[in-house]
Image: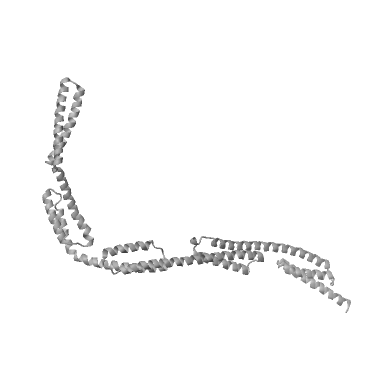
Amino acid sequence: ASPEEALSYFVRKYDDVAAQVALLEQRVEAKAPAADMNKTLSHLQEQLAERHLVGDVPVLQARLTALADAMAELQRNEKAEQEAARAAELAAREAIVAEAEQIAAKDPATVQWKSSSARMNELFDAWKAAQKSGVRLGRSTEDSLWKRFRSARTVFDRHRRAYFSQLDSDNAAAKAAKEALIARAEELSTSTDWGQTAGEYRRLMDEWKASKRASRKDDDALWARFRAAQDKFFTARQAANNAVDQEYAANLVVKEALVAAAQALLPVTDLAAAKKALQSIRDRWEEAGKVPRGDMQRMEAGLRKVEDAVKAAEDVHWRRTNPETQARTSSALNQLEAAIESLEADLAKAEQNGDQRRIAEAREALEARRQWLATLQKSAQDFA
């Protein structure tokens, strides 16, 4: 070949290296991964060192030196970013593990199992996502965190199984106890011994309230059966009471008239006549028979009011005619009259002597005794 043709071959080699240097500069500008670019840089440096090319080699050498510096800076930045990402990933994994351990450490009696189980599953999903696409933390670090997380999940699952096993046992015991109460309630539902059976149902209700609850679904179904047995009995009792009330409606009319007649005796002015009339009303009251249950209290209260008034009048009459009381009153009158005569004599004597002090004392004592005498005389008139 001619010298020009031979030289052009080496010029093309230079141009080829220069093009690769330009491309590497663009990749550095775009912040491509430094590890990938380091191989290209080393290859270009080797080609430039061989000097099998013709062109401005010092310029290419300077550009490669500048690229080496820029790539070193990129590597430092990448390393810092990787360390920051690793620290953030480690913190996120630590948070997952810490929350799982916190859930597992709770007292099983206070855990909300539905929400806690859902949260534990969410933490497990977050762990798997981090394992799949998160920053690698190193085998030893990841193994250590995974052991803690797995241990927390194991403890939580063990507590949950134990809790629900005990819950099932308690639920079975509660169901058995309430089934027994239901059996007794259903046995009583056809009874016609209204009073005693109603009392039995009250005792059964107290036992039901004191017994432990089963699961909500079971407890609602058991309560429906228990209540149905009660309703059957009380509905039958109500029907029987309605029939009885209807039968006793005529008796109510009679007793309302008797209550009106009894209340006409008030106020009591003639005790003997009132007692005689009240006894006649009582006799007719017993003959009239029962009244509807809803009116019993009202009827009894109406008659009792008249009976209490007659009894009170009888007590007053007795106090007035009591011989012992009359005798005590008569004796007191005699004593007061004698005391007044004595005080009148003392007053006359004091006036005769002009003793003002004794006059005042005698008048004061005399006035008090006369007031007592007036009171006792009024009482004596009442007794008479």
Quarter of the figure with residue 153: bottom right
* In the foreground, 190 or 34: 190
Q: Does 353 sit above or below residue 214? A: above
Q: How many marks?
A: 0
| Residue 174 location (% of width, % of height) | 41, 66
Q: Residue furthest bottom?
A: 1
Quadrant for the C terminus, please: top left
In this picture, residue 316 sits left or right of residue 144: left
Quadrant for the N terminus, please: bottom right
Q: Residue at x 74, y 63 (%)?
A: 72
Viewer can see residue 219: no
Viewer can see residue 179: yes
| Residue 299 location (% of width, % of height) | 20, 57
Quarter of the figure with residue 189: bottom left
| Residue 340 location (% of width, % of height) | 15, 30
In this picture, residue 349 sits left or right of residue 120: left
| Residue 264 location (% of width, % of height) | 14, 53
In this picture, residue 346 sits left or right of residue 27: left
Q: Residue at x 21, y 62 (%)?
A: 292
Q: How is the image coloured?
A: one colour
